[in-house]
Amino acid sequence: MLGSSLLVIICILLIFFLIRVKRPNNFPPGPPPIPIFGNLLQINLANPLKDFERFAEKYGNIFSFYTGSRPAVLLNSFAVIKDALVTKAQDFSGRPQDFMISHATENKGIVLADYGPVLKDHRRFALMTLRNFGLGKHSMEERILGEISHILDYLDYPTNLICINNNLRFYVLFYQIYDTFPVLRILPLPFKKAFDNVKIIKSMNQKLIDEHKSTRVPGEPRDFIDCYLDELDKGKNCVSTFCEDKLLMNIMDLHFAGTDTISNTLLTAFLYLMNHPEVQVKCQQEIDDVLEGKDQASYEDRHNMPYTQAVIHEVQRVSNTVPLSVFHSTTRDTELMGYNIPKGTIIIPNLTSVLKEDGQWKFPHEFNPANFLNEQGQFEKPEAFIPFSAGLRVCLGESLARMELFLVFVTLLRRFQFVWPEDAGKPDYTPVFGLTFTPKPYRMHIRQRDTVKQ
Ligand code: HEM
Ligand SMILES: *[C@@H]1O[C@H](CO)[C@@H](O)[C@H](O)[C@H]1NC(C)=O
């Protein structure tokens, strides 16, 4: 009995010894990894932030750690992140491959595609398409206002909103297991279920594409899908990088990237506005003044609303919706801050560390619209405002997101007053940690404002 346990222990030690994790030369420092697990046992996976703070204190603004046998480098502070994502953009704009997510999406979308000609073409195309729909008959602005009118109809009834969807979290856990321990992929864990879910969403979107195909008029696009189908007509049968199976992944990506982010930002906005009534009132005064006599807001009005603009930006800064951006990876052996970083290293830009960095903001640790106002009360955006990240992979939906946030924010504040319920106690601003940061569920009272003539 004792003998066999001893044998097992020796075997384990041997395995540990044989597959010892070896740091590359001159790699950024970090906690010493152990075989198989890397640094995972040193990190509380349910709430890893405390541990990462500890690492940053000990090892500095650029440090490394291992998830299993994969090295990752965490970047903190504006200077470091800018140097990587902007100054050395070519080297730092890849995406880690061989993640479960990339298996499920087959590398055909945008968000998780590695950097290369296909991605470049698709980014250019999507940006151009979004821009072309900015103005004109089927403009984004008109569509957003159309969507807002549905929200208004809904809010005209007294309601309590609690609209947080946490389904995602469950899958994220399995993705993590799948990515960290490739051996476990053969076990009957619900990986298949996660893949199946992707299949269901895929078939829904395929139906959407089929509908477009049967109703479209070539050359007269109504939306993104029509534009893509027009593009396909040009280069028959995928001679260019455009291809129908990529269209499917592209719309799934745009949908996925554009939904949670916007709704989490708005949820944060209301949480702060209710608890800073003086800020809410000041926005409403400005909005009433600028929109006097008008039916609805237009995106152009932002130029006359410096205070409201400052508040929306401050909300984005504190809501910090995508705290660790989307992971990048190095596309070749490179160098950062004097350290060597081999090709294929996972790069994690900590956007929080910039959005709350001492020295970059007048009030880094409090909610204060003055962070975006100069002495004359004009709107001014500090360089460290990077909730959409920066460089070649910067959020593709940034301009759309900003238009949506502005129009929703202004329209709702003009019409309603948002009140923190008296019996709700103190607000809890700590977000729920995940792929995106979400405020904890809260209740709010919504009152019609009587200042507005209906
Ligand atoms: C408040 C709202 C939003 C925030 C805070 C946000 C933030 C981000 C961030 C941090 C990234 C990662 C950039 C990087 O890898 O360095 C990203 C990527 C992306 N976002 Fe957004 N986003 C928002 C809204 C949207 C919307 C509305 C869309 C859809 C049109 C969108 C589409 C995308 C796409 C396609 C990517 C991947 C770009 C690439 O990999 O090259 N986002 N976003
Ligand atoms: C990102 O930066 C913030 C602020 O400096 C810090 O609290 C947090 O722990 C960091 N996150 C990671 C994953 O290092």
Image (tube, rainbow, N blue to C red):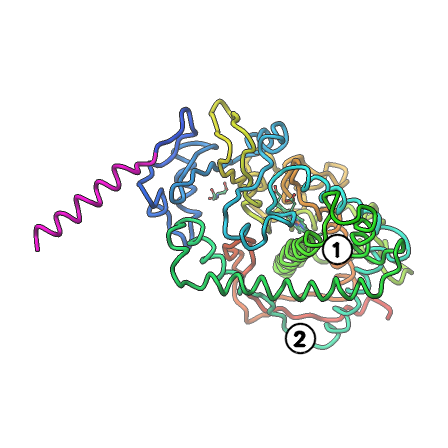
Mark 1: give few (<14), some (14-19) or many (20+) Cα within 10 Å. Answer: many
Q: Which residues are magenta?
A: 1-21
Q: Residues within 10 Å of mark 2 (few under 14, many from 20)?
A: few
Q: Quadrant of residue 441?
A: bottom right
What mark, if any, has residue 366 been given in the picture? none
Residue 275 visible, this angle: no
Whether label 1 lies within 8 Å of ligand 1 gets the answer yes
| Residue beneath the point at 60% across and 32% down | 82
Q: Quadrant of residue 446?
A: bottom right
Q: Is there CB contact under 8 Å for labels 2 and 1? A: no
Question: Which part of the image, by quadrant, shows the C terminus?
Answer: bottom right
Q: Is residue 329 left or right of residue 416?
A: left
Q: Residue at x 41, y 46 (%)?
A: 50
How many angstroms separate mark 2 from mark 1 (CA)?
A: 22 Å
Q: Which residue is mark 1?
A: 404
Instruction: Give the secondary structure at mark 1.
Output: helix
Q: Residue at x 62, y 58 (%)?
A: 260
Q: The N terminus lies in which quarter of the figure?
A: bottom left
Residue farthest toward the left in the current orientation of the protein: 2
Nearest the camera: 108 or 442? 108
Provide residue 160's location: percent of width, then percent of height.
Answer: 63, 73
Which residue position is annotated with label 2?
A: 159
Given residues 335 and 147, the one toward you in this image is 335
